[in-house]
Amino acid sequence: MATHDQRNEATDPALSELGAVDVSAEIPIGGMVGAITTLSPQLPGAPNLTANVGLLGLVGIEFLQELNGDFYLLASDNAMKIAEVF
């Protein structure tokens, strides 16, 4: 029986290494009621993504504390945790 290589090989390696990040302003607790925040990350060079290109989108949420007008990340034991991914 023949074995198959299970690695994923990019059809266009230049597109496989692109990435973009967009960050919103700080939003106070309760500040999103009735509002919408839109994030629009732009890939460098505005490439044409073909049907052979996979796109992965992720959302991260950081919890901050404001102290004297500056924002600081909450310590890991004082912040929300991800309980389940499905």
Image (cartoon, rainbow, N blue to C red):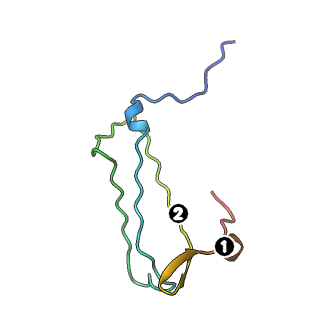
- Give the side of residue 75 with respect to residue 66, left or right: right
For label 1, count other residues whose C-alpha is less than 10 Å away and answer few (under 14), some (14-19) or many (20+).
few
Q: Residue beneath label 2, please?
A: 60
The residue lying toward the viewer, choosing from 39 and 68, is 68
Taking the view exactly as shown, the residue that stands out farthest to the top is: 1
Q: Amino acid at mark 1?
A: Ala
**Quarter of the picture holding the N terminus:** top right
Q: Position of residue 10 (x, y in %)?
A: 45, 30
Up/down of 75 relative to 29, above or below: above
The residue lying toward the viewer, choosing from 2 and 31, is 31
Residue depicted at 33% across the width and 53% down the height = 42
Residue depicted at 42% across the width and 31% down the height = 13
Taking the view exactly as shown, the residue that stands out farthest to the front is: 68
For label 2, count other residues whose C-alpha is less than 10 Å away and answer few (under 14), some (14-19) or many (20+).
few
The residue lying toward the viewer, choosing from 82 and 65, is 65
Up/down of 59 relative to 4, above or below: below
**Quarter of the picture holding the C terminus:** bottom right
Up/down of 33 relative to 64, above or below: below
Q: Residue beneath label 1, please?
A: 75
Judged by depth in the image, the label closer to the viewer, 2 or 1, is 1
Element carrying mark 2: loop
